[in-house]
Image (cartoon, helix red, strand yellow):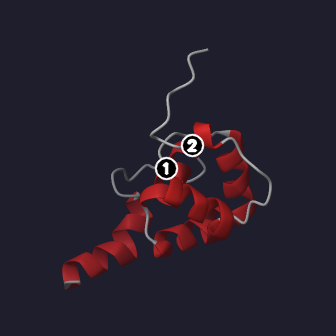
Amino acid sequence: MNKRNQNFSSTAAYKNVWYSPKTDLNSPDTIHQVLMFGNLSEIQFLQKTVGKTTIKNLFLRYPKKVYTSVALNFIKNFVLGIQTPIDEQKYLKFTPRATR
């Protein structure tokens, strides 16, 4: 990793969450984007800033179809420690959307 990328991943991503300096870290969209596309340092920063309980509640209350099955299993089981079954169809991006 070159010095420029190292500086970006250690500072700018936390302040701007990739694309916007006004990102609300308590937004369900932001939570899902960081969980799916962020690296472990960004996920850890999110947990310290927002709190693991808040992240878990937003993850369960506002599902978003952005996850691959491997990523969903990692986030659900290891990052968030969710023991109860969830409706994976609401999280997996390669499943049909609900038509109701």
Q: How many marks?
A: 2
Q: Which mark is residue 67?
A: 1
Q: Residues within 10 Å of mark 1 (few under 14, many from 20)?
A: many
Q: Residues within 10 Å of mark 2 (few under 14, many from 20)?
A: many
Q: Residue at x 51, y 40 (%)?
A: 65
Q: Residue at x 53, y 50 (%)?
A: 32
Q: Quadrant of residue 73?
A: bottom right
The amino acid type found where label 2 is placed reads Tyr
Task: Identify which residue, 35 or 25, lies in the foreground.
Answer: 35
Task: Identify which residue, 22 or 77, lies in the foreground.
Answer: 77
Label 2 near label 1: C-beta < 8 Å?
yes
Q: Which mark is residue 20?
A: none
Task: Identify which residue, 27 or 86, lies in the foreground.
Answer: 86
Q: Is residue 52 left or right of residue 5?
A: right
Residue 47 locus on image (x, y percent): 62, 68
Helix, strand or loop at label 1? It is loop
Q: Residue at x 70, y 46 (%)?
A: 60
The amino acid type found where label 1 is placed reads Tyr
The residue lying furthest to the right in this view is: 84
Quadrant in which the C terminus is drawn: top right
Q: Which mark is first along the chain, 2 or 1? A: 1
Q: Residue at x 76, y 50 (%)?
A: 85
Residue 5 locus on image (x, y percent): 24, 76
Q: Is residue 46 left or right of residue 78?
A: left
Per the model, the C-alpha gap separating discs 1 and 2 is 6 Å
Mark yes or no: residue 24 visible.
no
Residue that badge 2 annotates: 91
Residue 83 locus on image (x, y percent): 79, 60
